[in-house]
């Protein structure tokens, strides 16, 4: 089993995580297969929670299956589908099932998902969800104040989008999440490295990286169709005009290669940015391409050590 | 609004500048007299209903108020976060478009983009750093003013100055 994000961060290595979208079906094999593609190359895989508001196997199930397949998992948990009670019980289950990391986020609204007629929950927001997780783990109590019989031991993650307006508030919004308990953060796709640098500089000024590992998100744009989808079909993604020009400037047969090259360059640039301690690779449907991207960016396979046992008493 | 097809909230553009809100806050802030009025209203159900109806109409017209009963306006540049389709009380989600549009209603401006602009212009941008607790859903339809005067609300917490090496020093 890979040592997990916790071990990578503790060792001060540049941490690598990747996205693993669970299948639309009761299909354990699919999770095992995808985990196998990423094993030994990343420190942990993010198991998404009905990503894009489209129903998939639950992230808790996916995280447990990924763990059985030898991959340290980050269980994503959104506020879209569960109220504060369900949130706490899922977090406790993750602790009992030895899921090593949880990541709390607000989540995409169902309006543009596959069940637009469903009731959005949003009982708590991303910041409050992080606070709830920290209360469970560090104080050993529910939001109601009732004590837990055993505390979960996971690491607490968050997300941030440094590119969405109000951009001047984005570093402070992450700082709020860190104050609430976030210990690592993954970001939306980075296509604008200049804005990422500005955001990271603000984080350093706020003292965020000392308390929270910052893992910017990267991924290859493999076709002009995907470029259009990212620009218009996914909320909150910023593709600057120069990136669009670069991808449209190559012959149609070379777009995939140019997109991968751009992703590799971005990864290499991230290692130089103060305050950045890793990267999160999102290549949905292209998990098989992740090892090549990491090779070309110069990342060796991650050391395989046993996952540090998750203490029943917290960190 | 005749074509409204969704039950979820729509981002509202406040009808008065933030400065008007801050001025009204100087008058409406909790003091002994307001606390006595709150107690009186609670003892007289008809008075409470009339008062709450007035509050509803006023705040609905000015801020798109939905009567959550736990007003965040004084800390959000007088822009109502409960008109966010996700009812986010701690800041914008990650789905805001590059032009500042709401993820759910792309034809409308994100309430938090407006809140940030309004709070910053009024010199109140530090207010946005406050950590808001999850809403108490028993309070819908109740008077937020009475709740404030009677000190029923759970005020947002200061996360400590979000400055270098001082982040989160204040215990939460």
Image (cartoon, coloured by chain):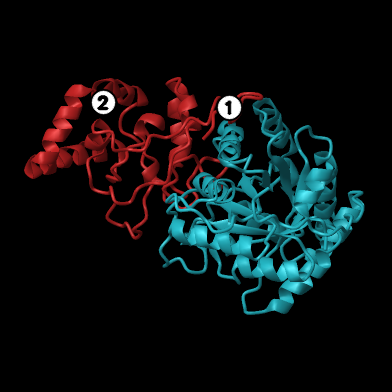
Query: Is A85 positioned to the left or the right of B139 in the image?
Result: right
Q: Is residue A246 above or below residue A272?
A: below
Sequence order check, earlier mark of 1 and 2: 2
Badge 1 element: loop
Residue at point 27% right, 44% down? B67
Residue at point 56% right, 67% down? A54
Q: Quadrant of residue B13?
A: top left
Q: Quadrant of residue A170?
A: top right
Q: Nearer the viewer, residue B26 or B148?
A: B148
The residue that label 2 is drawn on is: B30
Residue at point 76% right, 38% down? A276
Q: Are marks 1 and 2 on the same chain?
A: yes
Rendered location of residue A160, percent (x, y): 62, 44
Chain identifier of the residue bearing label 1 in the image: B
Badge 2 element: loop
Q: Is residue B33 above or below residue A15?
A: above
Q: Is residue A80 visible?
A: yes
Rendered location of residue A205, percent (x, y): 68, 25
- For disc 2, the neighbor class at 10 Å (few under 14, some 14 to 19, many from 20) is some
- Quadrant occupied by the N terminus of chain A: bottom right
Rendered location of residue B142, percent (x, y): 23, 45
Q: Nearer the viewer, residue B125 or A315?
A: A315
Chain identifier of the residue bearing label 2 in the image: B
Q: Nearer the viewer, residue B69 or A180?
A: A180
Q: Which chain is cyan?
A: A
The residue that label 1 is drawn on is: B162
Q: CA distance from mark 1 to mark 2?
A: 27 Å
Q: Which chain is red?
A: B
Rendered location of residue A193, percent (x, y): 74, 38
């Amino acid at each position: 089993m890979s040592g997990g994000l916790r071990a990578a961060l503790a060792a001060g290595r540049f941490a690598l995580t990747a996205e693993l979208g669970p299948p639309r079906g009761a299909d354990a094999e699919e999770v095992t297969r995808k985990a196998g593609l990423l094993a030994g190359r990343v420190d942990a895989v993010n198991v998404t929670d009905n990503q894009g508001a489209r129903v998939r196997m639950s992230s808790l199930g996916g995280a447990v299956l990924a763990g059985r397949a030898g991959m340290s998992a980050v269980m994503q948990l959104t506020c879209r589908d569960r109220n504060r009670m369900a949130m706490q019980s899922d977090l406790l289950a993750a602790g009992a099932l030895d899921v090593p990391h949880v990541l709390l986020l607000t989540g995409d609204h169902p309006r543009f998902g596959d069940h637009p007629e469903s009731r959005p929950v949003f009982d708590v927001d991303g910041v409050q969800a992080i606070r709830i997780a920290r209360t469970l783990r560090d104080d050993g109590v529910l939001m109601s104040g009732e004590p837990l019989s055993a505390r979960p031991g996971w690491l607490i993650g968050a997300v941030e989008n440094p590119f969405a307006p109000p951009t001047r508030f984005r570093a402070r919004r992450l700082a709020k999440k860190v104050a609430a308990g976030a210990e690592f953060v993954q970001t939306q796709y980075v296509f604008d490295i200049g804005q990422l640098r500005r955001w990271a500089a603000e984080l350093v000024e706020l003292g965020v990286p000392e308390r929270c590992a910052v893992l910017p998100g990267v991924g290859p744009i493999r076709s002009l169709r995907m470029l259009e989808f990212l620009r218009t079909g996914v909320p909150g993604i910023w593709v600057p005009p120069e990136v669009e020009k670069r991808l449209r400037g190559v012959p149609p047969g070379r777009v995939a290669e140019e997109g991968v090259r751009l992703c590799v360059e971005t990864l290499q640039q991230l290692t130089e940015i103060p305050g950045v301690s890793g990267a999160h690779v999102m290549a949905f449907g292209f998990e098989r391409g992740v090892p090549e991207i990491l090779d070309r960016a110069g990342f060796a396979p991650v050391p395989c050590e046993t996952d540090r046992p998750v203490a029943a008493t917290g960190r | 609004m005749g074509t409204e097809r969704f039950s979820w909230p729509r981002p509202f553009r406040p009808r008065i500048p933030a400065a008007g809100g801050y001025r009204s806050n100087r008058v409406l802030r909790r003091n002994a007299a307001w606390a006595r009025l709150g107690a009186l209203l609670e003892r007289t159900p008809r008075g409470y209903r009339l008062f709450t109806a007035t509050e509803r109409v006023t705040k609905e017209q000015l801020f798109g108020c939905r009567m959550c009963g736990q007003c965040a306006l004084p800390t959000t540049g007088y822009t109502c976060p409960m008109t966010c389709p996700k009812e986010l009380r701690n800041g914008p989600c990650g789905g805001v478009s590059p032009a500042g549009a709401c993820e759910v209603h792309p034809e409308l401006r994100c309430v938090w983009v407006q809140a940030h602009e309004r709070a910053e212009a009024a010199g109140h941008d530090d207010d946005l750093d406050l950590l808001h607790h999850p809403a108490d859903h028993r309070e819908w339809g109740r008077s937020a003013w009475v709740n404030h005067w009677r000190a029923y609300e759970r005020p947002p917490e200061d996360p400590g100055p979000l400055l270098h090496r001082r982040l989160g020093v204040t215990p939460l």
